[in-house]
Image (cartoon, helix red, strand yellow):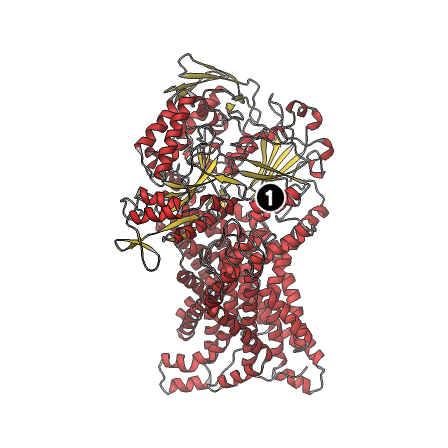
Amino acid sequence: MPRLRALSLIAVLTLAGCSGTQDAKQAAAKDLTGGTLVISTAGGPDNLMPPITVQNSGLQVEDLVFQHLATVGPALNSIGDDGFTPDLATRWDWSKDSLSIAFHLDPDARWHDGAHVRAADVAFTFDLYMDPKTGASAAAQLANIDSVIARDSTTAVFWFRKHTPDQFFEATMQMQILPAHLLRSLDRATLASAPIASQPVGSGPFRVVRWESGRTIELAADTTGGRRRAHLDRVIFTQSADPVTAFTRVATGEADLYEAVRPDKVAEVVKNPQLKLIIAPSLSYNFLSLNQVDPATGKPHPVFGDRTVRRALTMATDRRSIVANIYDSLAVQARGPFTSAQASADTTLRPMPYSVDSANKLLDAAGWVRGADSLRRKNGTVLGFTIAVPSSSLPRVRASVLFQEQFRRVGADVKVESSDNSAFGARMQARNFDATIGAWAQDAGPANARDAWTTAAAARGLNNYGAYRSSAFDAELDSALTVLSATESHAHFAHAWKIITDDAPAIWLAEPRLAMAINSRFVTTGMRVDSWWAGIPKWYIPADKRIARDAPATAAR
Amino acid sequence: MRALIHRIGQGFVVIAIVATATFVLIRLAPGDPFAGALENAHLTPALRAQWRAAYGLDGNIGTQYVRWIWALLHGDLGWSVSANQPVARVIAAALPNTLWLMGIALLLSFGIGMSLGALQAARRNRATDHVIGAVTLFGAALPDFWLALVVLLTGAYWFRVFPVGLASDPLLPVAASLGTVLRDRLAHLALPVLTLLILIAAPVARQQRAALLDRLGSDWIRTATAKGVGPWTVFRRHAWRTALGPVVTLGGLALPALVGGSVFIERVFAWPGMGALAATAISTRDYHLVVGCVLVGSVMVVAGSIVADVLSQLLDPRAMQIESDVSRITS
Amino acid sequence: MTSIALASGDWRVIAQRLRTDRRSLLAGAVLAAMIALVLLGPLLSPYRPYEQLDITHLVHAPPSAEHLLGTDSYSRDVLSRVLSGGRVSLAVATSAVLIEVLVGVLWGLASGLAGRGIDTLMMRIVDAGLSVPRVLLLLALLAAMPSVPVWLLVLVLGLTGWFGTARLVRGEVRTIRGADYVLAARALGATPARLALRHLLPHALGPVLVASTLAVGQVIVLEAGLSWLGIGVQPPQPSWGNIIGDGYEFIASAPWVSLGPGFCLVLVVLAVSALGDGLRDALAPRQLPRT
């Protein structure tokens, strides 16, 4: 799983576990087996090949079809192996120097085609992820792993370069184990187009029955292997391009779950007795990124190169109101490049205040003086810039229009430039923008900020688009990620957050929460903040609540 | 016959122009098929280059064009990067949906539109004429996507009569009887067809009314009237048939819609057809799929328009002019 | 419908016919009123169209005395936006149609007068343009633009809409270029340019005028669709299209956002279509029998 995923389409992603937590033991009873979950989505994946999948819609399917060696616990602890639950590996041993971990695989585990899962598959998977030809987005996170060796048919040993707090997390959560016998002969340069990328064979609780690209993905509970089967018979993803249509399918009961309910629909979900609303924190945050490099010249940006101006522009914006306008109650104001649900969060950090007066004073002091037309100028140049947004993302377009108006009030001439996803992506790659609404969906690990905001990540092709560079921030973050004491680590994180928020490389906007509408006949459990869908294998429908489509699956078309 | 062969030859010219122009145009847009999700920074330039080469998208545009033509001559439309399938298979999955939806919608629209137009012509300048005129004009003035959503919410949400979007029930069992399948398809068709009907019947009715009135005013009909043939009989016997010509030509002009679908309607109704497919292909820069969609579309349009020409010449050899409000259907 | 030969004095007759047609008069009046309204808009509108009044408390306020058409999701006054957006929509539509007509007429004239080879090539290009749905053409063209200011949008709309006009004009020219008076003019030594402008163009103009009236309506509707897809007139500049697009998501909870501009849009499209019909009837050369 890639550490950072840019949010596509709708600015909502991951979700906290909490809701009708019925007892899992009771759920084990046989009469809980059966039922169909129809998930309505507004987008779909282009492949189901874990190393190269980036869309959230693809990750959801893959998490049900493939397995990790172990999975992070509900508290999302990433230091050591506390809270991790066995998945493909039933247990693991650490070496004394913590430089190697031996994972013992479930000897009964089988691929959906019936073959046994073996340690050689694990070694193969690591090799595949690390091969530059594959283009796996998680390769950078796996760099601390020196090698993976199959000691015997069910023992895979990981050798690490350094002992780090998050080495277990990276070793288990960044890779999903893949079947070597089906992938070995494939050309790694074209994995996405291999037939198995659309008909994947995994070892997880569900197998792919059919995938009609752009329309439907049907999964069925897998009954091979020794693993306890999922309660539900089927999980079906149905895709509608328009979010209003996708939501309406759930409102009428034709589908059971929609993961991105918009604020104005929340009341409707609450009123509907067939639906329940699940609101949970997420690990994503968004911001207005201020590019410190002038895209035209490669020199410091004429507006955003100046720290005072960045701070002034931050104070000029009423972020709390903007967040309320876009998300209503479905988001809180972001404090910095982290979310409150993360262990590394500093929830005492105060966002820069909203003060138009201070903003105006700072801008005056920085030499940007208001003219008769109420626009500010410095050496004859107007205080102006563009905000680039993808036209398909409603929250981003909204945020840019709201920012634009607030900047206008302090004398800045701001234009919004929206373009389709591909053109927007190309602009980001080329760093060809003044400002943009950025959003990161993080994984549960601690090191997300390293990939998004450090000097090392400012190089082209990496994630620090605004090219923020601060050696002080880099050093604090590095300490936070390498010290093995949780309290010390937290203190370093807090320092790092203070430095970066004072430098204002971006105007931190919101931590969106996830609002899901789900049909009330489902008993849901095991949702994690980083993936609400993680618990689906444990979800069930009480016998008295089943409807026609829950009947034992007559083979679907 | 020679004229027909000539006409077919010219059809090939049209198709070549369309395909070539699209091939170039879509490559002018920034981005490439491997942009993946937004801001996918993990894709290094080296990796992109590797993928471009692997999927035959490397080299300059001339090389790519020659390569594409060569593949096309071997019956290969290329690889769709966004669907990870051969382009031909992606189109084969979408085209029937569009033909099915647009075919029924156009058939109904023409049937109803022509009848309304005839009724208007027969009752020229009376209340019926004005009322129908106003209603059909109104239909033609609504933005497609807006009307589609209102129809969807009304027919499927406020009144839960029809399903919300999609072309068929994804849960329909494989063993379902033909009757069940047919009923399911029709239920999913109802709302998008209704939307299209409101949008398309209007220009057809206007066309038909004008054509009929034009014919009713022609000399030979006046002669017939002078000979004592009743107006209604004249209308039924003569005017109707001769006025079919323009409508058939109109049908020819509606062909791009028949094959290309409607981006707006398909999007709102989550209808997996050619319009939605082509729009997605454009926005994901799925080069081969874009060109494939346009190519298949123009082949069918050209073929269809040749048929329409032949038909309308059989009906009325006079050259026909069509006013441009039919482009509403073709957009 | 049919090609109509107009003598130079006929325009007065047509104007006369239009003046006596009640439907055309009404349509003209509605159109004139709309144009006046959007021209005076900035004077009439109570707020600035892009002004966000209170983004926390005044979002989606229903119609009231202060906000006759309510407010939108950014707390902007919808009426002010409709008035100012009308300017943009009408300006975009008429300029795009002017481009359509200009390119289409020139292309059609040239093709109609050209020799067989060139005529064939030119018409095949027109066929090619007509065989691709216009929306797809627009999507592809607009995707290639790094940013789309209004003038560019107008240009792109105009350049994707002229194919029908070209075919129409070329047909007219082909029909009448063999007419006696044209042959006579040619025999008297008229240059091709003079022939085209003095003798052919006026005759082709009638149907073109009818067609372009209707095209104005289509372009307004089309711009709305593009705005809905996020590639029309860019925010915060309002157009009827993007106001309706802004209201799309909230059609059930705040219908006033899209109903106001929708009503104006429908009214204008109705008026121009009715005017087009009237014009067509006025151009019809023969008296219709009473039925």
Above or below for A188 versus B234: above
Location of residue A452 by image quarter: top left
Above or below for A176 versus C168: above
* Residue A283 visible in image: yes
Location of residue A375 by image quarter: bottom left
Q: Considering depth in this image, is C236 or C210 the residue closer to the camera? A: C236
Residue labelled with disc 1: A266
Question: Residue C281, image x and y in percent?
Answer: 57, 79
**Which residue is situated farthest in the top direction here?**
A96
Left or right placement of residue A168 versus residue B224 in this view: left
Q: Residues within 10 Å of mark 1 (few under 14, many from 20)?
A: some
Q: Considering depth in this image, is B34 or B307 the residue closer to the camera? A: B34
- Residue under the image location 68 percent in, 24 percent down: A26
Question: Residue A97, image x and y in percent?
Answer: 39, 13
* Residue B104 visible in image: no
**Which residue is situated farthest in the right direction here?**
A544
- Residue under the image location 35 percent in, 49 percent down: A360
Location of residue A220 by image quarter: top right
Question: Residue A58, image x and y in percent?
Answer: 51, 37
Q: Considering depth in this image, is A542 or A410 the residue closer to the camera? A: A410
Question: Residue A486, image x and y in percent?
Answer: 43, 22
- Amino acid, disc 1: Val
Q: Which secondary structure lies at badge 1? A: helix
Instruction: Return the chain for callout 1.
Output: A
Above or below for C217 versus A409: below
- Residue under the image location 72 percent in, 44 percent down: B177
Q: Considering depth in this image, is A442 or A320 the residue closer to the camera? A: A320
- Residue under the image location 39 percent in, 36 percent down: B42
Q: How many marks?
A: 1
